[in-house]
Amino acid sequence: MPTTKTAGRSPDSSGMETLDMNLLVALDALLDTNSVTLAAQRLGSSPPAMSRALARLRRALGDPLLVRAGRTLAPTPRALELRSEVSVLVARGRALLAPNNATDPVGLRRTFAVQAGEGVLAELATPLLAAVQAQAPGVTVRFLPDVSGDTASLRDGRVDLEVGTLDYSDSETTVRRVLGDRMIGVAAAGHPLVTDPVTVGAYAAARHLSVSRDGRPHGPIDDRLALHGRTRKVVATVPTVTSALFAVRGSDLVCPVPAWLTATTLPALGLTPFEIPLPLPEIALGIAWHPRYTADGGHRWLRDLVHETMLRSAAGARPPI
């Protein structure tokens, strides 16, 4: 423990005397070694400094604590009475102030609320729950839906961890990027864009479906097409990727979707991916949490596990194209 500049006992504002709590550490070492020299060595101090600490302790407790017995020091009855109690107090203080480093997930009994979109859950839920069961059988995970514009859930504690495409810039949210996804096109089997070469002109001429939670039909694709002097016709918007995939499956529509987030769903629905002939921005996927959980051992275990599971899932996913 760090030393302070207080010397002995000093009166506080109420007139009562206060005691330097660092003396507890010195007292513990003195009572455990029955030696000023050995106590000083243990605490990285000097014998004169430890002698001064012993003198302060004697004044504070009204007892000599250690008395000369030949060439050694012998504890008084009061010192013997204090020894075990002081040792426990110092150990508890050190444990309280020690960094909360390792958490054994096997003994963890906790429920975590994880907010994620359905695309993320389609790829993450199964491997994550398997990993949680293997490492921390006492942990329960509650998956919550991704809510557009929800900025308070992490702050007020309703959500422990958010996973997906994150756009936080406030100091009350900690964000960790995990991986980058890319946009691909998807269409029903037999569509010209999956049977013929995909050109900018052919892509622009197709009937498009757009995914937007707030119903916006235009985005980065339209900006890139405009550079080629092209526009596309968006015939409808849907709020989720899953609803878009079902709409595409039974129509002549095409739709842009994230490659990793649909790696499992596309073959299950019999849909065919194709490369969009435009340079599109990367989709950054990550995790976010409130800073109050940064040093929490259980929370750190969960977010590290989510991070590792996302990377493992993305690495093991079969490239759609």
Image: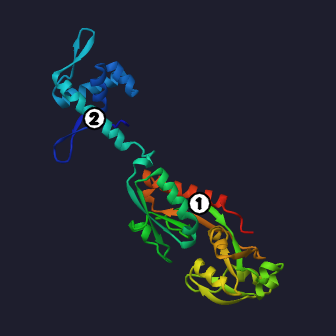
The reply, left or right, for residue 168 in relation to residue 201 is left
Residue 160, quarter of the rendered image = bottom left
Nearer mark to the viewer, of 2 and 1: 1
Which dot marks residue 111? none
Name, please, the residue furthest toward the top. Answer: 70
Viewer can see residue 288: yes
The amino acid sitting under disc 1 is Met
Q: Secondary structure at mark 2?
A: helix
Circle 2/circle 1 CB separation < 8 Å = no
Where residue 319 sits in the image (x, y, percent)? 71, 65
Tell me the residue that label 1 is attached to.
310
Residue 73, quarter of the rendered image = top left
The reply, left or right, for residue 103 in relation to residue 67 is right
In this picture, is 151 found above or below 234?
A: above
Way the structure is coloured: rainbow
Tell me the residue that label 2 is attached to.
88
Q: Nearer the viewer, residue 244 or 258?
A: 244
Q: Earlier in the sequence, mark 2 or mark 1?
A: 2
Where residue 39 sits in the image (x, y, percent)? 34, 23
Q: Residue at x 68, y 76 (%)?
A: 270
